[in-house]
Structure formats: structure tokens, C-alpha cells
Image: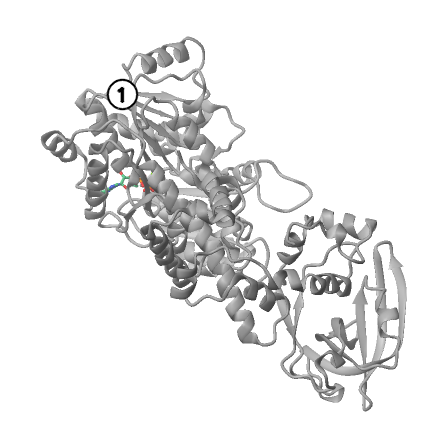
Amino acid sequence: MLSTPVSDLKGVGCKISQAFKKAGINTVADLINWLPYRHEDFSSVSKISNLKPGKVTILAKCESIETKQVRRGLKITTAVLSDGDSKVRAVWFNQPYRSTQLLTDKLFLFSGSFEFNYNRYQITNPSVEMPKKFGSNEPNNFLEPVYHSIKGINPRQLRRFIESVRPTITMMQEIMPQFILKKYGLISRSESYLYMHFPKSRDEIILAKNRLAFDELFEILLASQLNKQANTRLKSRSIKFDQLAVANFVKSLPFSLTNAQRRVLWQIIQDFESSTPMNRLLQGDVGSGKTVVAGSAAYICAHAGLQSAIMVPTEILALQHAETLQKLLSPFGVKMVLLTGSVKGVKRKCLLENIANGEADVIIGTHALIQKTVVYKNLGFVVVDEQHRFGVKQRQELLAKSSLMPHLLAMTATPIPRSLQLTVFGELDISTIDELPSGRKPIKTQIWAPTNTANLYDSVEIEISKGRQVYIICSLIDDNPENDTKSVEIEYRKLRSTIFNHRRVAMLHGKMKPDEKDKIMNDFSAHKIDILISTTVVEVGVNVPNATIMIIENADKFGLSQLHQLRGRVGRGEYQSYCHLIMSDHSKPSQRLREIEKSNDGFHLAEVDLKLRGPGEIYGKSQHGTLDLRIASISDTKMVERVQLAVRDFINSGEDLLQYKQLSKRVQKYQRLTNLN
Ligand code: ADP
Ligand code: MG
């Protein structure tokens, strides 16, 4: 039975049961779910004399074998294998049991990597299989599952235990509705596990993975659809559309909105009118002009007599937004306040009063907005800027500050690839600003070796003399004697006393006091500073259109989306902008840097990032708990779309999810994970 404890299996003693437990395997079901991460292919057997470096399989006898304890925690087992004609060395790490396994006169199949190591060719860590299992000495098409190892249980034992629960696998119950299986050509759940653990062909593995991946995605997608339905049952305040007022406001802006901005604003206006809460994600590349959209929506909300809260991740950004929006909103009599952690004492008390009695219409701030002491009079609209910087919990806390559910607009410059839109973000409506304000020139990006920077500084000097400004990003604040990563303090001292001693150089980092930071940021905005040497505190949102050069020291230490964000601090105005990525050393630039150099398109880069790092890294922990995707690849858009159709079929069928006990349990887990309300 699936629920049988593994300790009841034959051969599982106290020690092994402990080892299983450590790996999270308590029941037979857990054991069955310990799926192989790949399959070794024994189908092509080579003669030893013909071996070429790379993955090989040979049919050979073990002539001699010995194990040495090299140091604590490392035992090396070395064997000489022979196929009658020639001999080859094989080496295993920490697998001393190989001696007892191999010292017989029998032929085995060895499969592993044939490589040049320690001055000779050898096969490293080969897996071993008995050919007689397939009835002949010439196996064909044999595939052996390879499992993540479990400390205290050797792979041979593990396979024996899995073999022993084969009858249970054969009797596994289906969890999916039959009509879905049929329509989407899926094998049964039981078959899929049998094929994963005991495949007879590559095709079987493909069928099995296809089915298991389908299940994983189906659970996530169904969960987000159910959350979406639940959202439509909530109540919010409807905000009426006053065409004249909106037209006047838009006319007052210092520029005309792009078509994309207009489209998104219109979507928001329509959502506002409804008394079910808006649940919208606005994605737009860096510099595409999301702030003014949020500001316009906040105006509409204030015009209808309701409060808006705009939450941003850093104090610098809060300050800057406050300044931008103040200019737009105050002519219309909209009162805006700025609430951050550094507003203290009487000033804070007054602010809180203004928020509570409704005098403040638009409240901009950092995490401070969700503190207990902040009470809103009638919060109708919540904006979360740079939403990936916040957890689900923080969004929820802000939304909970109102008796009726406020409308939510989450904004991000890290575009969400289509497959993730459908899965993790499936319950949100998504708006996209897919066009930059006119007149923007693509940023020119270049990778530099660390010693080449004299040329670079010449070009910086030319830009400054044209009246432009420069960011230089270092990852550290102080110098760290243990590595040679550049630091803000040292670069600041160096540059202002040497090449740029005739220029206005300043530094900025997170350890400075809030009012110091404000002053520097304001001075940079007002062009009282030419070169700003900073940590990544300027990474998100900061907007100084006159800055045209972004220099990133130790660029190889940054992630792809972070580099794109940093680069997005330039190219925000009419001037040609440049981004210089300086390597830590003379090694070859990574694919990441190459991609950044080639492309300015945040959407493309997000897809690349997803492929390079996987969704867990990008969208995983902080926001959604762990996405339990073991087989499915969330970047497989085709598959995701197919599963989405299946989810729709299921919902339309009117079948009750609770009827499918196991399925509903798993779906509920995801519902809690991704829920935004
Ligand atoms: P992001 O989408 O990265 O948050 P911002 O909202 O900070 O971008 O806008 C970037 C810059 O573009 C700002 O200086 C803003 O004033 C300007 N901007 C926004 N919309 C337009 C527009 N339609 N035409 C010209 N400039 C615009
Ligand atoms: Mg922004």
C-alpha cells in the first residue's frame, strides 16, 4: 500500500529506515516518488580498444579492485576492467561496496565517463549493471534509472527497494479525470511511474515524463484559476469613470502618453468601475513609463474620494516617486504624503493622523505603509511597485488595510515569461507596456577587460563635457581585503583624486543616513553631481534622464535581470546612452553577459534568464514557496498552454474537484501558495 511505512519493507532495518527518513522518505508513496533524474543508456556497448573520451558503456570483467582511504570522508576504489582484448581503469568515489559486488568472474556492464584524469585515461564513477538481467550478454536498448543518492543507502539497494514495491505501483489509483486523460492522450498514473522506474524504451520514458509533467502543471494552473474565481466573489468599492476629469488630467501631463500607456490606463479604468477588486499585474520594461500610469490611476481614485497607497521597495524610490507625483497631482488639489521609516516623531504622528482622517489622498511609502499604526480612512487602490521585491504576505497585509478589498495594481520591470503568466501568475490579469516613449535610443552595451579602462574613462570624460552624467556601480561598500571586488569607498577616493579630480564626484550606499541619501540623490537629479559611485541601491526605479553612462564593476558577479535593471537607469531620455560591463578578471565573459551585450529587450532577457536559472531561482522562494516542479519545465510554453486548455475543460465540465480527493489536496496546497488575497 502507498501509505505503508518504508520501515515495513523487507530488508529495511533501523539504519536504513533512518537514512530514508533523512531523505524525507517515510512511506511507500514517498519511495515511489523518488523519481530518477536521468536514465543511463546501456544500449551501445563499446570495445575497450575503441573507447573515445565521453560517455561510454563497456561489457567487461573486473580483474582487480582495491579501495583506499585517501583522507577523511574520501574513499577511492580503483579497478582494472578487461573485455578480453584490452584493459581500462575504473575509479569510484566513496563506493567501497564495489569490491564485494565486482570480485567475481562475471561480466558486467559499466557505464560512465571515459576521461583523461591524473595523467591517464579512466572511466570515472561508472554505474554497473548485470547483463544477464536481460537474458543475453548482448543487451540492447537497456535503460537504467539513475536516482539522487541517499546517504546510507547504496544505489543498488535503493533500486532493490523500488523493485520490491513494483506491485504497489502497478495498482496505483488514477488521480486525474478520465476524460482529461483521454482527450490529451495521457497514459495512466500507474504506467507513468512504472515507466520511470522500469523503462523498456526511450519512448516509455517520454510518455511517462509527459504525463507526470502534465499533472504538476495541471495542479498549479487549476489552483490559480480557482483563486481567480475566488477573487471575483470579493467586494470592492467601485470607482466611477469621469471622462472629463481623466481627459483633463492626461492633458496636463508634461508629455503625451504612449499608446501602450493609454491602453493600460483604460484597462485599469474599466477594472475600477467594477465592484469586484482589480487584480492586475502591469509589466513594462525599465523606462517604459509605469509610474505615470499608476499616478493617473491614483488621481482617478482620489477624484472619486478614495485613498491610494503606493508601496515601493526603497526609500530612494519612494522619495523620487513622491517628487514626480507631487508635481502631477498637486495642481488638481490631490494631497500626497510620503511615509517611510525615517519619518519620525511629531511629523509621523501628524502624517498618520492625515492618513486616518482621510486628508491624505495618495500615500507613498516603503514597507512602513503596512505597519500596524497606519490606519487608512478609505483605501480604494493599492499599487505595489517593483512587486518582485515584495512577498505575497506584504501585499496581503496592505490589502487587508481596508474593510472592502482595494483594487490592486502590481508593477514589475522584470517581465513575466508567457509560461509563468499562465502558471504562477495565472490568477492575475496582466497588462503590458510594450513600447518605450518615442525618441529613446537603444543603449549601447559593451564588455570590458579590467585593465582596459583608460579608453573607457576617456569616453566618460567626453560625455561629461557634453553635460551628461554617469553612474558607476560597485557591489561592495568598503573594501574587503579577502577579495579584489571593487568598492564604492575606494573607487570614490581614487577617481575624485585622480582622473576625475576636476569633476563633481559623489558616492551613495545603503549604510548612509536617509537624509544624506536624499541629498545625494536630489543633487544628482539636479545635476549638481557628474559622477555617482553607488552600490545597487539605485538598481530599481531611479530615474535621472540626463544620466547616460552606466559603468558596472565586477559585472560578472551580477545576475542577468539585475544587470538589465541597472542598465535601465540610463537610456531614460532623449540622449544616446551607454552601458559598460567591466569584468573581474580576464576570463571569458559568461553567456549572461553576452546576452546583455546583445539585447536591450527585457522580455527576451527574462526568457533567457528563465532558461539559464530555472523558475525556482527567479520566482521561487520569496514569493511562492517552493514550486514543486520536478518533471515539468515551466519554460515549456507549449506544454503549459496545453495544460491550460485541459484546466479549462475541467472547469467547464462542472465536475466537482472534491470528488478527486488526491488531486484536490494538491491543488489546495498551491492555492495557498499563490493566493494574493
Ligand atoms: P519605469 O517604467 O521604469 O518605472 P518611469 O515611470 O520611471 O519608468 O519612466 C521613465 C521616464 O520616462 C521618466 O522620466 C518619465 O517621465 C518618462 N516618460 C514616461 N512616459 C513618457 C511618455 N509617454 N513620453 C515621454 N516620456 C515619458
Ligand atoms: Mg519604475
Q: Is residue 645 left or right of residue 496?
A: left
Q: Residue furthest bottom?
A: 85
User: Can residue 411 be seen from the camera position used here?
Assistant: yes
Q: Residues within 10 Å of mark 1 (few under 14, many from 20)?
A: many
Quadrant of the rendered structure where residue 566 is?
Answer: top left
User: Can residue 601 be seen from the camera position used here?
Assistant: no
The percent position of residue 515, horizontal first and vertical second, equals 44, 22
- Residue 265's place in the image compared with 176, above or below, is above
Q: Residue at x 67, y 54 (%)?
A: 28
Q: Amino acid at mark 1?
A: Asp
The percent position of residue 257, horizontal first and vertical second, equals 19, 42
Q: Is residue 554 left or right of residue 676?
A: right
Local SS, label 1? loop
Q: Is residue 279 left or right of residue 177?
A: left
Q: Residue at x 48, y 34 (%)?
A: 507
Q: Is residue 175 left or right of residue 407?
A: right
The percent position of residue 497, horizontal first and vertical second, equals 52, 38
Residue tagged 1: 361
* Image quadrant occupied by the C terminus: top left
Q: Nearer the viewer, residue 325 or 126?
A: 126
Quadrant of the rendered structure where residue 278 is?
Answer: top left
